[in-house]
Image (cartoon, rainbow, N blue to C red):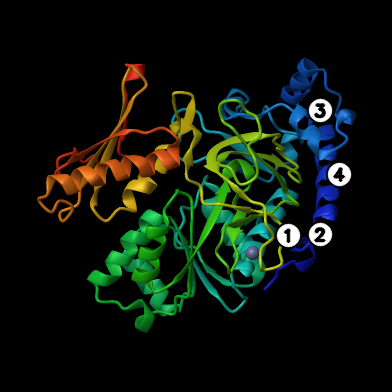
């Protein structure tokens, strides 16, 4: 199903011509109206007309979170203050928020892309949408709210939490799809179970859109089983409209990123050089249609990779793999870039390994992975354990290119932290 079949299936040449045209317009507009960019262009000796191909994108300056804060509150506006229609701020940060302005056209485009994304996942005007995201300054709820209304769905602006009321609403109004965070999805699945609600029997739920926090395939399966829904992975960030930047189609193999509105690059977060197609790196995005606050080469700090091959659904917009972490988490060990998530993936795929682990780096650039064994992980034979230890070290080497020391611990021996666990201890920084 398509919302805008023509845009969604543009051939790559036409799409790239459109991107270049929109990029040139964006660059001209920021050069004319945003002093921050005008100064950056002057430093680089760059004229807006120098931009002749998409490859010239690399000549443009990056924009960082720090730039957004430094230009708070209105420094990055490309339209007069009274031409703005809505203010959002970014979520979950301390200190000054990032102020993000939308014009009327930006608000429309954001809803349009959400409508496109929902329809791609099979939503129709007959569907009933219970939105369990936080309403307010955060983009997560409002943008999807307007997207679903655009399709013609009944929208229930429930917001998060208050699970008894969520259940009442889902039951009485025959909710068919929900939008929520992975952690709330897991909670709600447990809540239904505790209240003897069998969602397949008692509710009309069909689909769930899960986003706003990174989560794993295992979590997706748990929500699907517990809530009796088909879970779709989505990606968005407030700096780029909020939700509706990239969504999964029915094939659920990567998220189509709407390239007629955003230009994407994947770079090595250390060197800022592009990585080869399909390789992991930091997602960098340039807005192509934003009026109020266009951003050039915004460093999202999210780590992902591109799937360059065409998708079976017929859409030509390239797909992003699941976000695996933040570039801030990256470790450099003996010159190799390593993400703790790579190590986690290898460990958690092992039956004999428990849930808790630590990564230690010493002053000699040596890595030790301390990992708890599962309850049934040790059969009493020391030589079996030693064999497993060297196999695991070898599997880790294949993934992260350096061979760590692997140390097994009895189940429950590593500390459990509430909230975000600290798993990396870097003595090189101590
Ligand atoms: Zn597809």
For the residues labelled 3 and 4, the Cα–Cα distance comes to: 16 Å
> 69 or 165, which is in the foreground?
69
Q: Position of residue 41 (x, y in %)?
A: 78, 22
Would you say the residues marked 3 and 1 are in contact, meaning their CB atoms lie under 8 Å apart? Answer: no
Q: Position of residue 309 (x, y in %)?
A: 67, 57
- List the residue tagged with mark 4: 21
Q: Tag 4, which secondary structure?
A: helix
Would you say the residues marked 1 and 2 are in contact, meaning their CB atoms lie under 8 Å apart? Answer: yes
Q: Tag 2, which secondary structure?
A: loop
Count every numbered label the image shows and give the total: 4
Residue 11 is marked as: 2
Between tags 3 and 1, which lies in front? 1
For the residues labelled 1 and 2, the Cα–Cα distance comes to: 7 Å
Residue 147 is marked as: none
- List the residue tagged with mark 3: 31
| Residue 73 appears left or right of 402 | right
Q: Position of residue 200 (x, y in %)?
A: 38, 80
- List the residue tagged with mark 1: 316
For the point 13% across and 45% down, the residue is: 382
For the residues labelled 3 and 1, the Cα–Cα distance comes to: 31 Å
| Residue 125 appears left or right of 414 | right
User: Quadrant for ligand 1?
Assistant: bottom right
Query: Mark 3 or mark 2, which is nearer the start of the sequence?
Result: 2
Query: Mark 4 or mark 1, which is nearer the start of the sequence?
Result: 4
Query: Mark 4 or mark 2, which is nearer the start of the sequence?
Result: 2
Q: Give the quarter of the image for residue 310.
A: bottom right
The reply to whether the residue tagged 2 has its Cβ within 8 angstroms of ligand 1 is: no
> 241 or 101, which is in the foreground?
241
Q: Is residue 115 visible?
A: no
Q: Tag 1, which secondary structure?
A: loop
> 319 or 19, which is in the foreground?
319
């Amino acid at each position: 199903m398509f919302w805008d079949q023509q845009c969604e299936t543009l051939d790559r040449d036409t799409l790239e011509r459109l991107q270049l045209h929109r990029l040139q317009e964006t660059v001209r507009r920021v050069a004319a109206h945003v002093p921050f960019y005008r100064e950056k262009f002057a430093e680089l000796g760059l004229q807006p007309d120098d931009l002749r191909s998409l490859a010239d994108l690399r000549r443009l300056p990056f924009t960082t979170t720090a730039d957004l804060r430094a230009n708070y509150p209105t420094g990055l506006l490309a339209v007069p203050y009274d031409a703005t229609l809505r203010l959002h701020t970014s979520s979950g940060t301390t200190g000054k928020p990032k102020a993000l302005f939308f014009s009327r056209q930006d608000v429309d485009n954001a809803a349009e892309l959400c409508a496109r994304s929902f329809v791609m996942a099979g939503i129709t005007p007959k569907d009933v949408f219970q939105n369990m995201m936080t309403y307010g300054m955060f983009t997560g709820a409002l943008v999807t709210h307007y997207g679903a209304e655009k399709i013609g769905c009944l929208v229930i602006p429930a917001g998060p939490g208050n699970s008894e009321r969520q259940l009442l609403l889902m039951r009485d109004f025959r909710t068919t799809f929900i939008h929520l965070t992975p952690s709330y999805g897991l909670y709600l699945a447990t809540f239904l179970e505790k209240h003897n609600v069998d969602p397949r029997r008692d509710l009309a739920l069909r689909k769930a859109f899960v986003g706003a926090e990174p989560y794993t395939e295992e979590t997706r399966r748990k929500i699907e089983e517990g809530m009796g829904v088909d879970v779709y992975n989505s990606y968005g960030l407030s700096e780029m409209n909020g939700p509706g930047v990239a969504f999964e189609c029915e094939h659920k193999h990567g998220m189509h990123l709407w390239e007629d509105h955003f230009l994407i690059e994947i770079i090595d977060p250390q060197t800022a050089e592009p990585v080869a197609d399909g390789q992991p790196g930091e997602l960098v995005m340039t807005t192509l249609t934003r009026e109020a606050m266009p951003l050039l080469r915004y460093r999202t700090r999210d780590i992902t990779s591109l799937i360059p091959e065409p998708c079976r659904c017929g859409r030509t917009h390239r797909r992003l793999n699941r976000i695996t972490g933040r570039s801030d988490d990256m470790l450099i060990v003996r010159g190799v870039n390593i993400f703790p998530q790579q190590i986690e993936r290898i460990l958690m795929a092992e039956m004999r390994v428990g849930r808790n682990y630590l990564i230690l780096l010493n002053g000699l650039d040596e890595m030790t992975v301390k990992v708890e064994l599962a309850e049934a992980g040790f059969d009493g034979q020391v030589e079996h354990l030693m064999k497993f230890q060297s196999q695991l070290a070898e599997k880790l080497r294949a993934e992260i290119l350096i061979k760590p020391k692997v140390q097994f611990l009895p189940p429950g021996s590593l500390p459990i932290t509430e909230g975000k666990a600290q798993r990396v201890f870097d003595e090189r920084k101590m």
